[in-house]
Amino acid sequence: MEKIIAIVGPTAVGKSALGLKLSQKFNGEIISGDSMQIYRHLDIGTAKDSPDELRMVKHHLVDICDVNQRYTVKDFQEKAVQIIHDLDDQKKVPFVVGGTGFYLNSLVRNLNLGGESSGDDDLRQELLTLEQDNKLDVLQNILKETDLEAFNSIDISNSRRVIRAIEVYKTTGKSIVDQSNGSKWADFYIIGLTDDRAKLYDRINLRVDKMVDMGLIEEAKTVFDNRESIPQAKNGIGYKELFPYFEGISDLNSCLDEIKKNSRHFAKRQLTYFRNQMDVDWYNISEVNDYQQVISQKIEQFLGGKNDNLG
């Protein structure tokens, strides 16, 4: 059975840095589990690894879409499974790194996500129109009435997740959170990084400040100006909050404060999701001495000699 390492946790906690270090040590390659890093040219706001870091270790599912292309959790699941099979053939260890909880869960639990769409074009168009009109509250109410289990489990602030949950229920008659195919297809060791709340929030605030220095405002302006950008790209944290500044209805500092606030709220939702939905081995980076070494030893035990390059 294929063995896969996943690294999860809230934004800004250090998942990417750990993934780079471990994938080098264990002859691995990285599969991005982030729903925004798929987009070309959205580099700063999505916290992609730098060009040098991308060259250090081969990355998959990064920079594979333009901002006008739709990308679903089903797309991620199918592509990630194929990459994992290919890496196993090459005797390499897959490291799935990212903070998009439902993406990771779809892979770990082998969720049956139905077809590409609901099969009901009228329904799909209705849902997409509501999304384009920023009627998230209406979509949430539809989901609540259709699938209360999903409403209480998924990130309902993400319109694409809400739409997908509605479609899956309409297609299969089952909740999107209860779509396991039943058989265990691979062996996962899921590493969770966390930190004390105050320290994590400080890390998030500092990251936003660094992003601004790196050119976040200019990057967000290209998203704002691109009429072909789909809502999935435009609604990313770090971009949508700056739109009022570009429209001249809010000052820059207020918009940056909004990015920090939304990022903190997102981190809280990520932690809640991973703790409730997945079997994670958690490490508080401020409390576990030399946590990277501890994790490395756990991985060696998990791989059980499968890999010949165990540092």
Image (cartoon, rainbow, N blue to C red):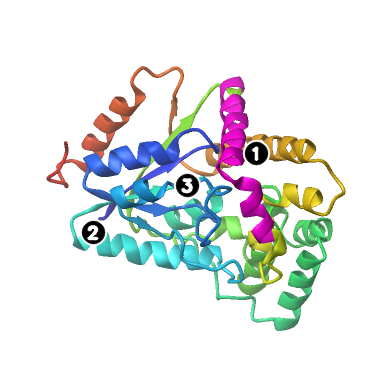
- Vertical side of 122 occupied by 56: above or below: above
Q: Secondary structure at mark 1?
A: helix
Tell me if I can see residue 61 in this picture. Answer: yes
- Vertical side of 230 occupied by 250: above or below: above
- Vertical side of 89 occupied by 11: above or below: above
Q: Main secondary structure of the magenta part?
A: helix
Q: Residue 7, position in %: x, y?
A: 41, 41
Between discs 3 and 1, the one toward the N terminus: 3
Between discs 2 and 3, the one toward the N terminus: 2
Give the extent of the magenta segment.
Answer: 198-223
Q: Residue 284, position in %: x, y?
A: 46, 24
Foreground tag (3 vs 1): 1
Q: Residue 295, position in %: x, y?
A: 32, 30
Which three-letter amino acid code belongs to the residue tagged 3?
A: Gly
- Pointer 1 residue: 263
Q: Residue at x 73, y 48 (%)?
A: 242
- Pointer 2 residue: 88
Q: Residue at x 18, y 56 (%)?
A: 91
Q: Secondary structure at mark 2?
A: helix
Can you tell which mark lies on residue 98? Answer: 3
- Vertical side of 50 occupied by 21: above or below: above
